[in-house]
Amino acid sequence: MRAVVIDDGALRWEERADPVPGDTELLVGVRAAGLNGADMLQRRGGYPSPPGVPPDVPGLELAGEVLAVGRQVTRFSPGDRVMGIVGGGGQAERCLIDEAHALSVPERLDWAEAGGFPETFCTAFDALFSQASLGPGERLLVTGAAGGVGTAAVQLAHVAGSVVVASVRDEERRASLGALGADEVIGPDEIPSHGPYDVVLELVGAASFPSALDALATGGRIVVIGIGSGGQVQCNLGQLMALRARLSGSTLRARDRTAKASVVEGVRRHVLPNVAAGRLRVPVCETFALADAERAYERFEGGRKLGKIVLVAP
Amino acid sequence: MRAVVIDDGALRWEERADPVPGDTELLVGVRAAGLNGADMLQRRGGYPSPPGVPPDVPGLELAGEVLAVGRQVTRFSPGDRVMGIVGGGGQAERCLIDEAHALSVPERLDWAEAGGFPETFCTAFDALFSQASLGPGERLLVTGAAGGVGTAAVQLAHVAGSVVVASVRDEERRASLGALGADEVIGPDEIPSHGPYDVVLELVGAASFPSALDALATGGRIVVIGIGSGGQVQCNLGQLMALRARLSGSTLRARDRTAKASVVEGVRRHVLPNVAAGRLRVPVCETFALADAERAYERFEGGRKLGKIVLVAP
């Protein structure tokens, strides 16, 4: 097979040995693989793969057809359309995925949508509901809402009955966020005047964190998932006490097999039925051929995208 | 009745009208009322009372005999020995307490112990178990562990099967913390070398927070309850993400009636049986007469106490 390979910061399309599935794994012929912020970090050497995955092949999510299964696999068979999360290695012609981290692809999703779904929706679902315990009627702020996780979070919170405020820097993407279910779409400067927020999904970091914290409601929760603008912030512990606030950070990739399986199972139960019903969609901003990863990464880092950049098999 | 009254930073022992119980309230003849850090703040004008309590009579916890009950009170009768939490007004000869915030005094506790129990144990119980979800076998750091909340937390966590590391500045109080159930008693400088901690109960603030955060385990939780050494800290959001850590602040006083009732009910179910069994005790450092509040506050602010300073009726 061929794979996207990180070679001292460059991305090459190189021959690699076909992976062989372990007992609980599926060998998947990759049809599409979404890009995530973590890939950009990994390419620059800043976010090494966890043990057990190829250290130099990026890609945390993929969709494709099952080619072969390990001895203990019970839920999938060769020929099934699957999508799922991996610790790395997704941006290749073939990839292994643990069956506990795989989902059936709903009819409504084409390959590019399915390839951009798993990491993004798992991350947003886990952050909003497991970490922040977002409930119906609560007011949610999503900062940097136009990216993959942001567009997933806006939709998930809207479907679950929350009041969604989406902040995004440039104006041209605001209408699209309204169409995805945001009740109010604002610029970063407007964060203070649109609070108080019961929950904040922080996808930007230091640039928006102080104003989000200042606009937090009593009993509010902030979950930090992205820190593209930096991670060092001043925090007033007295303010956290007075608000009885909760601040947490999270990543999906480094969790153990069981913890990831639990997130995927939550998405299967609570998210996929709404995909099947047409209430959630995967906004794909642009697709590139797998062999053309270098250009796709450039597009990702260029910003001003709405939704996902996805690599697709020819 | 007479009450401790804050008058421009001074404490006076003054005549006040007897309070009249509302429908769900008990009128209690106060036998003992514990001091808390919040009283020191309130005396300096920094922590105003919530609505509905006397603004200038301090005191968040008390014990005494029920003198009269409101029309809807069902659980207590005149003559009962009760203890409980109030939004203020506890440091007086008579005080009103909502029956949902009152507990029967276990046989084993004398009046001074009962008067120093409620706020302290409710705060520690809520922080450790409701906020931080501390579980058996988990490693807990309690900073500034020698005070009222600290000695309560050390005991509660020990009884619940956690491994307790207690940090305290001066050496002479370390043996007593071991006797209360701390597995390791350390100085603040030793916080980094005794981690990683699954849970940190931060009772000191800025002076210990950075080393506690650096020594946090993956999936760790920090609950900030006290910030006597200051509240402004630098926080690295990337570190929170990498650790999947949770940071929360909390106070008991400002919560609504129902939320407080839920904490008190938790203490009744999970803490009082262990008081009755002799597995938990209330370390009373020193008692002062109610009329002598000025000296008691001085003693409180002087530090180097183990457990509670309690005002008692003559």
Image (tube, coloured by chain):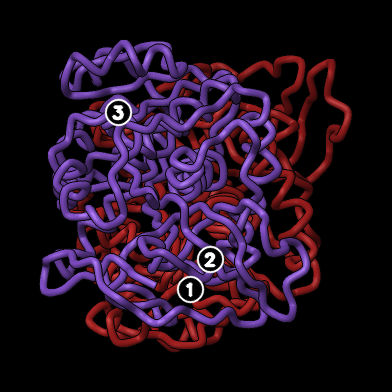
Chain colours: A red, B purple
What's the amino acid at mark 2?
Answer: Ala
Residue B119 point in image, percent of width and height: 45, 50
Residue sitting at x 22%, y 47%: B296
**The residue marked by circle 2 belongs to what chain?**
A
Q: Nearer the viewer, mark 1 or mark 2?
A: 1
Q: Is residue A276 left or right of residue A133?
A: right
x, y (%) of residue B99?
64, 65
- The amino acid type found where label 3 is placed reads Leu
Q: Chain of mark 1?
A: A
Q: Are marks 3 and 1 in contact (CB under 8 Å)?
A: no
Residue picked out by circle 2: A153
Residue A65 appears in which quarter of the rendering? top right
User: What is the spatial separation of the Cα atoms under label 3 and label 1, in whole angstroms?
Assistant: 43 Å
Judging by the rendered image, the residue that carries numbered circle 1 is: A140
Q: Is residue B197 left or right of residue A153?
A: left
Tag of residue B126 = none
Marks 1 and 2 in Cβ contact (< 8 Å):
yes
SS state under label 2: helix
- Rounded to the nearest whole Å, what is the CA distance between mark 1 and mark 2? 10 Å
- Residue at horizontal 37 percent and vertical 19 percent from the top: B165
Label 3: chain letter: B
SS at circle 3: loop
Q: Residues within 10 Å of mark 1 (few under 14, many from 20)?
A: many
Q: Amino acid at mark 1?
A: Leu
Q: Are marks 2 and 3 in contact (CB under 8 Å)?
A: no
